[in-house]
Image (spheres, grey):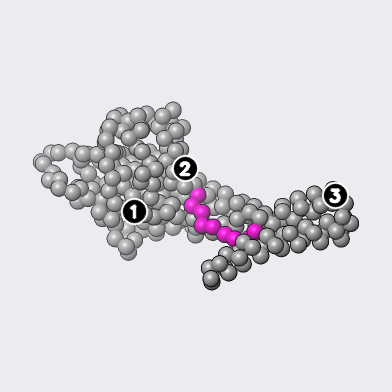
Amino acid sequence: MIYLFMYFLTYGVPLIGTAILIVLIAKVVFRGAWWGWLLAAAGVIAASCVPWWLDRQELQREVAAFAPDEIIPDTLTLAPGALWHIEEGNHAGVTCSWECDFGDFPFVTKVDSGGVEYALQLGSSGQPIDRHNLWDGLYDVTRAPGQDFPYQYAYIGLSIYRDYGVPQSGDYRKPHWPASGKGVHMLVVLPADGILDFATADVLYRRHNVQRDMAQPFFWGQATQTVQYPSTKMIFDDLHAVATR
């Protein structure tokens, strides 16, 4: 019952308020003229969307703040190779598992997946690690002398607090980054020795996204939803477009 009441406060009350305002303006200001009802409805409905519009503008500014630190080439022509999809599991704005079919990329010959905690040896503390021994993240693989790492590329998706600026700085959040920063998504060339150092890594593509609560249209800012933008699927689709041009 409590949830029904909260739902009514969030969605029902704003809609009732909108209807009351339309009636009052149409009858008092426009004296019930038929065109007055149209103007009143259009004006009140537009006003109810102002919080949503303002949030959209702020969202665009926050996304744009990451532009100086992103790498988005016009096209990518790469030698064929195996790709390791490394990401955090079940994390909105970071995880893109079943939606992201890297096997559809023209340069990818094989795709496997792994979690960042194992592949990059990242713990929950978020402390910088200078060099990531990717061999330790492989299951049931024993490196033979002189053997190259079995993956040539990695697509890495991780929370932004684990990004460390890439290249690493020890301080993950740059001064111009908004607090709403959510994830970093990268296509990286992996060294043959399997030792990944973000300070010197060949990052071919890098995008950031943000997460914030956004007002929904028509509800005067009372109804909100959590949005990750651009979504992991949008970033994947953008990279796919770059790689197939």
Residue 152 location, x and y as percent? 26, 37
| Image position, residue 90 (x, y; %) | 36, 54
Q: Is residue 124 magenta?
A: no
Q: As displayed, is residue 223 above or below residue 131?
A: below
Label 1 crowd bin: few (<14), some (14–19), many (20+), radius 10 Å = some
Q: Where is mark 2, residue-wise?
A: 234
Residue farthest toward the left in the current orientation of the protein: 145
CA separation in Å, label 2 and label 3:
44 Å
Q: Residue type at mark 1: give it.
A: Gly
Residue 34 is marked as 3
Residue range in magenta is 219-229
Element type at marker 3?
helix
The residue that mark 1 highlights is 89
Q: CA distance from mark 2 to mark 1?
A: 18 Å
N-terminal-most mark, 3 or 1: 3
Q: Relative to 27, is 153 above or below?
A: above
Report which quarter residue 171 is drawn in. bottom left
Q: Dividing the picture into quarters, in which one does residue 108 lie?
A: top left
Q: Identify the residue shown where x is 32% and y is 35%.
A: 103
**Residue 226 among magenta residues:** yes
Image x and y of residue 237, in percent: 44, 38
On the image, the x and y values in percent for residue 135 come to 20, 47
Residue depicted at 20% across the width and 48% down the height: 138
Of residues 63 and 44, the one nearer the viewer is: 44
Please give the count of numbered marks on the rendered protein: 3
